[in-house]
Image: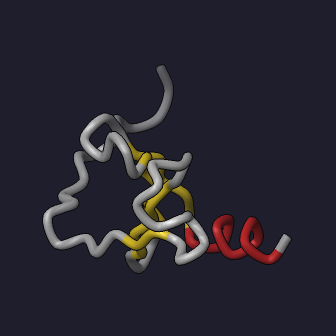
């Protein structure tokens, strides 16, 4: 393993948002996103406790523009 270990992230104050095009409560395959200054967090809306992906804000912006 190289580099420094990852620091735990506190998601307590995160405001999670789901797309208005996700179909409401139909149980579709949706993700939720939360924005912070250095990063964007993504999680499964059906299983929010399982895990999250973290992306640098600039990478998220490029992804959304495409």
Q: Residue furthest front?
A: 26
| Image location (x, y in percent) of residue 8 | 23, 46
Seen at 38% across and 76% down, the residue is 36
Q: Residue furthest right?
A: 66
Displayed quadrant of residue 9: bottom left
Q: Is residue 55 left or right of residue 26?
A: right
Q: Residue furthest top?
A: 1
Seen at 39% across and 51% down, the residue is 45
Q: Is residue 5 left or right of residue 23?
A: left
Q: Is residue 5 left or right of residue 43?
A: left
Label total for image: 0
| Image location (x, y in percent) of residue 33 | 45, 65
> Which corner quadrant holds the C terminus?
bottom right
Q: Is residue 18 above or below residue 54?
A: below
Q: Is residue 3 left or right of residue 46?
A: right
| Image location (x, y in percent) of residue 21 | 60, 72
Name the one closer to the observer, 47 or 37. Answer: 47
| Image location (x, y in percent) of residue 46 | 37, 44
Name the one closer to the observer, 57 or 2. Answer: 57
Seen at 39% across and 69% down, the residue is 34
Report the colour scheme.
Answer: secondary structure
Seen at 55% across and 57% down, the residue is 55
Q: Is residue 1 above or below residue 4?
A: above
């Amino acid at each position: 393993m190289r580099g420094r270990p990852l620091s735990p992230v506190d998601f307590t104050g995160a405001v999670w948002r789901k797309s208005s095009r996700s179909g409401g409560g139909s149980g579709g395959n949706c993700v939720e996103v939360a924005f912070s200054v250095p990063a964007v967090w993504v999680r499964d809306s059906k299983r929010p406790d399982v895990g999250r992906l973290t992306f640098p804000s600039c990478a998220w912006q490029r992804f959304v523009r495409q």
